[in-house]
Image (tube, rainbow, N blue to C red):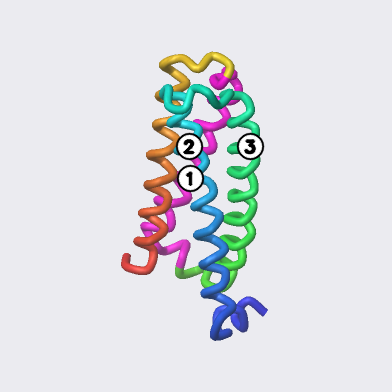
Amino acid sequence: MFQSLAAHPWAYPALEVIHLLGVSLIIGNLLLLELRLFGRSQQIPLEALARMSLALVAAGFGLVLASGLLMFATQALDLIANRAFLIKMLLIGLAAANAAVFHARQSLRRADRTARLQMLISSLLWIAVLASGRAIGYL
């Protein structure tokens, strides 16, 4: 079944588009929230923006997870042997751990220096995830 997915002329490229849409939702909304946390557009209430942004981040992550699992299933052995893929998975784990700590310490309520640092780290990690994902085909 998964081999036919990889062989179909438009199915795999469609999965890639869905995957990139999900990554765009994640990175775009995290950057938007980060800018607000750093003091931009202060007329927008942080809590309201966070509710909307984090809902879109969750939707993006759902798209990434579903499409990523399907793409992984088409070439699991090749991907497991690919350094860029392994780095990408490590970076996603680090981003998830950072997000867990961010929410556990209620960083949005504090909006302090640590919260800003955590948001910056999150954005950098997700950009590195994007870069390592692009490198999968070349390493």
Give x and y (percent) for residue 97: 52, 33
Marks 1 and 3, how far apart at CA: 12 Å
Marks 2 and 3, how far apart at CA: 11 Å
Nearer the observer, 138 or 53: 53
Q: According to the image, label 3 marks what residue? A: 52
Can you tell which quarter of the image residue 2 is in?
Answer: bottom right
Q: Secondary structure at mark 1?
A: helix
- Name which of mark 1 and mark 3 comes first in the sequence: 1
The residue positioned 59% from the left and 80% from the top of the image is 3
Report the side of 27 relative to 103 (left or right).
left
Q: According to the image, label 1 marks what residue? A: 28
Give the number of the disc on residue 46: none
Mark 1 closeness class: few <14, some 14–19, many ≥20 residues within 10 Å:
some
Q: According to the image, label 2 marks what residue? A: 32
Give x and y (percent) for residue 43: 52, 23
The residue positioned 37% from the left and 58% from the top of the image is 83
Q: Secondary structure at mark 2?
A: helix
Q: Secondary structure at mark 3?
A: helix
Q: Is residue 104 magenta?
A: yes
The residue positioned 65% from the left and 40% from the top of the image is 55
Task: Check disc 3 and give the amino acid type.
Answer: Met
Find the magenta span and give its range. 79-108
Task: Check disc 1 and give the amino acid type.
Answer: Gly
Above or below 110: residue 50: below
